[in-house]
Amino acid sequence: MALTDRVKQILSWYSSDNPGTQTNLARLLNYGALAGTGKLVILPVDQGFEHGPVRSFAPNPAGNDPDYHFQLAIDAGCNAYAAPLGFLEAGAAKFAGQVPLILKLNNSDSLAKMDHPISAVTGSVEDALRLGCVGIGYTIYPGSGARNRMYEDLREITLEAKRKGLVVVVWAYARGAGLSKEGETAIDVISYSAHIAAELGAHIVKVKPPTAHIEQAEAKKMYDKHQIPVASMSERIRHVIQSTFNGKRIVIFSGGETKDTESLLAELREMAAGGSFGSIMGRNAFQRPRDEGLKLLQEVIRIYKDAASSGR
Amino acid sequence: MALTDRVKQILSWYSSDNPGTQTNLARLLNYGALAGTGKLVILPVDQGFEHGPVRSFAPNPAGNDPDYHFQLAIDAGCNAYAAPLGFLEAGAAKFAGQVPLILKLNNSDSLAKMDHPISAVTGSVEDALRLGCVGIGYTIYPGSGARNRMYEDLREITLEAKRKGLVVVVWAYARGAGLSKEGETAIDVISYSAHIAAELGAHIVKVKPPTAHIEQAEAKKMYDKHQIPVASMSERIRHVIQSTFNGKRIVIFSGGETKDTESLLAELREMAAGGSFGSIMGRNAFQRPRDEGLKLLQEVIRIYKDAASSGR
Amino acid sequence: MALTDRVKQILSWYSSDNPGTQTNLARLLNYGALAGTGKLVILPVDQGFEHGPVRSFAPNPAGNDPDYHFQLAIDAGCNAYAAPLGFLEAGAAKFAGQVPLILKLNNSDSLAKMDHPISAVTGSVEDALRLGCVGIGYTIYPGSGARNRMYEDLREITLEAKRKGLVVVVWAYARGAGLSKEGETAIDVISYSAHIAAELGAHIVKVKPPTAHIEQAEAKKMYDKHQIPVASMSERIRHVIQSTFNGKRIVIFSGGETKDTESLLAELREMAAGGSFGSIMGRNAFQRPRDEGLKLLQEVIRIYKDAASSGR
Amino acid sequence: MALTDRVKQILSWYSSDNPGTQTNLARLLNYGALAGTGKLVILPVDQGFEHGPVRSFAPNPAGNDPDYHFQLAIDAGCNAYAAPLGFLEAGAAKFAGQVPLILKLNNSDSLAKMDHPISAVTGSVEDALRLGCVGIGYTIYPGSGARNRMYEDLREITLEAKRKGLVVVVWAYARGAGLSKEGETAIDVISYSAHIAAELGAHIVKVKPPTAHIEQAEAKKMYDKHQIPVASMSERIRHVIQSTFNGKRIVIFSGGETKDTESLLAELREMAAGGSFGSIMGRNAFQRPRDEGLKLLQEVIRIYKDAASSGR
Amino acid sequence: MALTDRVKQILSWYSSDNPGTQTNLARLLNYGALAGTGKLVILPVDQGFEHGPVRSFAPNPAGNDPDYHFQLAIDAGCNAYAAPLGFLEAGAAKFAGQVPLILKLNNSDSLAKMDHPISAVTGSVEDALRLGCVGIGYTIYPGSGARNRMYEDLREITLEAKRKGLVVVVWAYARGAGLSKEGETAIDVISYSAHIAAELGAHIVKVKPPTAHIEQAEAKKMYDKHQIPVASMSERIRHVIQSTFNGKRIVIFSGGETKDTESLLAELREMAAGGSFGSIMGRNAFQRPRDEGLKLLQEVIRIYKDAASSGR
């Protein structure tokens, strides 16, 4: 499939990468209903690991089946499906070549009490390659006292992934002793976290939608002094994207907590208006009956398609 | 030996694995009295390491001899015999080719006080290969503050084992500062632990029989809201298996504490009715005189054979 | 380009290094407006990582764009541009061959509370090579309880970098439980930190401008007894350079906190008079509008050019 | 030298080992005054490291000389001489081929206060090979909070040693926060420790002579219920050997604290009567004048020769 | 140069080492004013790292220059010059082949507060080889809670150094929570530390001159019971050497704190009388004006030359 000008433009930001990685990035941008638009909707399913199977799949028990999510991503026209080792391995052969895959390389569960927030590394670049993935995913917790271990593990994974032609997607979720609960989604913290992920070499950065709260006093001075607009969601999305190499890195946003469809779509329209590159939407999609989840994903895709058409 | 349809179906869930691992999985499913049924009874003997020799073998001192357990597993028609390095090494040459072996790669003793529950890694994939094993076993303690170390060691072992064609069996025993004693066998915790093991890439998951207790408040809400039945053992077994990739991973259950034969068999019948893939039975088998232990194992095998015939 | 006598003299101090490293050192000394003088002005941009994007780039939002800094360094005639992995990678292909690059291999953010000051290792020698860099940068915090981990990571990095022909630049910033805040820039501590960096094998040492404060009692006795002059900045710079292998290692100084242009240039003239090998100037350059930043860098370069002409 | 039936029988317990290891095990069993009997007396000299030179060698200063111990082992007809790196290296070339050597791979000194009992790893399998050793020795402290580190280091050493044809001798000395001082030599703890060493893959296990004390309540129930006889030393030795793979692993015992000759020999006769495979005797041998030490070792050897003749 | 009988005798103690290491040991013993005598005087300059440049070089600022120490060692006729990576690297090419070099592989600074005394590893065997050194130096702190890390790092370094034909020099300085300040130079502690260094595989052991204080009660009993003479310095030196493999390992002593020339030389004569193999003298040599430092070193050399002539 020929590349659109927009996809070519995006690839130009990653010109230091080898052709292998550029190929996989192109695959991601050229798959599904948003192919060629430069926008992305990704289906992630790591909630079974993170929150446990009953909290994740009781509302729609079909989601216990690993095949379910491959098929949902394919049918909805998502750009990719992302999951931990076990869930991907269970369907990778059966669905080989039908949807781009992203192997989530670290995960945390809700059973243990840890000294500092830190996920366990549960997969490897070699796993991603043998399963035919286009990329790997890794979660960092900026703000955690175990930050160095996470950044350093990611460094090694990133180096290997880039050498072997994979795309690196980084989930940047600030948390830890130095941050308030509210601060985890503060505009300054989200911007900073996204910037860190990009500095660590991420091709695609995933953050939560930011609030208007500002956590750090030193940052607040700057927002005030330079009158940076962060009142509306679209302003905040624009600010986050600017903070992440001035828009030269792909930044996508999670849907956040499960919520009703209307408020979810309204928020997404605001995010698209702010220039978001797309969404990563898990629970909101697979915790509904299949037809509803499918419909929702298609509506989300529609929002980004419209945004792309209007040049945002 | 030709594969039965059921074994072929089970192998289809592991289609991402290489032929080496599929061959060893087939060996496991095609050996002993349950060959071809898709059910498994495994004899594990790591109690000498875990609880000490006198607590393990005083009731039947013949069990001090490593040869004893090889012969018991062979004579009873078990699918496999699982033990730590020393016990396997002592008989692996003598009994070579007579019973599938699983090398238990980590173990804990009862002499030390540890900060967090965590076993020592006491063997390697290379040991498993040189001893002719079909697979390796590894214990994780979800809920432990040392969770990351265990998951990460397992990740490396799993990657190597799969590359070299071995089967990975994970013992998932929740324990640690975040859980009550009762919570270790709670239905939500057992389901979650089994799910984690599967996400970490286990081919076969081993858990304890779950109780009707629910440990985590967030999980309880889901059980209540969606009215998930967990009152009977067969319901709970069914729920655990559903939580472990909707039945697309082999889940087997331990016999638990030594108990009288009748209540043991009654519980096993319930578990079989719930769709259990089989049992892993150690102390209940080798702490009785040989003829009694042999008889018990054969009765257990009979229960699973009957379950398989009736399509459960 | 033929080497000047001064550059040949400087290279003679590094005669134990292989031709690859000497070549890259020559590239650094032979590039830009100060080529051949033996003086260096380097543009470093790691503030996005260290302090966050809003604190770094709000005063001049164009600085969010990674291309901006490459171009600024080129246009100003700097000897090199230094940045973390992400920022370098974003422009390394586009600006290939246009300015010597230094990959900053470790970084710290301002979100986490750490037990001891220690940066995360965020890049590798292999990254530096694939991005076409002439050298790598690494920050040590002498005085930190995590000192050994930093020195030992640096040892491995340095060994590999020298084997592969790269230049090693060490940022030596004393901090930690054993030092007062004022002590971090004390003349004895800065001298000691620069000496440590040189002993660890740095080719180029970067420290902050020292104050006349003396932190350690044992050191104070020596300053008093031997009447070592440290009252003026030029005396202190001379002392730091003497302490760093008697001037046989390149020592450059940061501009410190953002300040007004006049006091900045005045301080730099004092430093140049003391024999400084040059400056590494980030925030003072990129936090102004581009034309002002450019002008400032050129004035700084002029100061060192004059110093070189007058043989300092 | 042809192998006796007894030595062949012993080697049959190690039939999973490669011919290299079996050859070195045969060398050990076929050397010195006890050659062919299946009994072993080993001279260990690590007390200089463990307790310091003056506490070790002041009673017989000739023992400061590393040559002394090689010659003593040779002249007494011991099966092997075991010592740390330095002591072996000092004489390995001079005495090459004159006595089987065992390199002690970890050691602890009496100068430091450690958080948990754990020896430092002070030698490697490669050292053992270059010095011509038949095997390596390693000390574990079951009961220590640093248990996992020790077991895991041993696992790696054991794997390499077996791959390269060496014999693995494990010193199992229980100690740590979970045990009373008296418990360190309790019959249940000694049996358990010996079992652990065997499970970890030791070819030869070395423990202290057990007392009749029982440390763990759970174990005590078993001793009482099954009326296991542990009143006499010979009964206890028999129990330890049964607990160590039912006699299918070589278990040898230390002489313990320095004591008078008569009580020492009396205790050894009891141990031989209980089926001990032999003794490892250091301080009692080298802290006396050479002729006395030599005489003692020969008397000990005589006890085991007699035991072997009478089929124990 | 042909080897003297004394040098041949010394080499015979190291007969387990490969010809590479024996060659470098011979180079050390056959260089400078003491060539062939079996005595050694080594110039060590790691004080810049350990105490800082001003405390080290203010009394004689010429010492800031790395060339200074190479030339001083050469002119004085020292057997070798020992220093950390930076200082050696700065002159290794310029002075190649003019004096045997020892690369000090670990170092500590005086800026940080550490939990346990432990130096950072700041160089490697590969560094020593590329710089043309005859050996490497490593400091252990027996008595430190971080003992195991130091011994284990040294084990790996020693193994590699010996494989590659280098000489291993171990600085053994007892310190840590288990020792009083006075105990650090107690005769029992110094003897024990030297013995540990030798057991760890050191070819040359460096300790401080011992005092008559006895630190450990268990050791004191032995000194009293066996009436070991330690009242005079020469007796103590003799005892330390006896404790270090009965004189079959080279033991040299530091000059200790800076002191006046007469008392220094008097102490050295006592040490030589006790059979010391030589001295390692840093601060006392380079903190004086060059002619005085040179003269002092030559007087020290004279003392050892006389001692060698008179057969001590």
Image (cartoon, coloured by chain):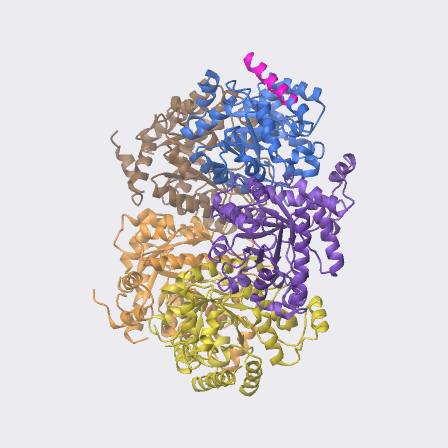
Chain colours: A orange, B brown, C yellow, D blue, E purple
Q: Position of residue B153 (x, y in %)?
A: 46, 46
Q: Is residue B101 above or below residue A20?
A: above
Q: Position of residue C93 (x, y in %)?
A: 33, 70
The secondary structure making up most of the magenta span is helix
Q: Is residue D212 above or below residue D85?
A: above
Q: Of all residues shown, which one is farthest toward the left? A: A1
Q: Is residue B118 above or below residue C43?
A: above
Would you say residue D96 is visible in this rendering?
yes
Is D192 contained in the magenta span? Answer: no
Instruction: Identify which residue, C291 or E25, lies in the foreground.
Output: E25
Left or right: where E13 falls relative to A298: right
Is D296 contained in the magenta span? Answer: yes
**Which span is picked out in magenta?**
D295-311
Position of the C terminus of chain D by quadrant? top right
Q: Image quadrant of residue D309?
A: top right
Q: Position of residue C47 (x, y in %)?
A: 49, 73
Position of the N terminus of chain D by quadrant? top left
Q: Image quadrant of residue C221?
A: bottom right
Left or right: where E135 falls relative to B12: right
Q: Is residue E71 above or below residue B78?
A: below
Left or right: where D206 falls relative to C52: right
Would you say residue B10 is visible in this rendering?
no
Left or right: where D88 falls relative to E242: left
The residue drawn where x is 30% and y is 45% is B16
The residue drawn where x is 68% and y is 60% is E296
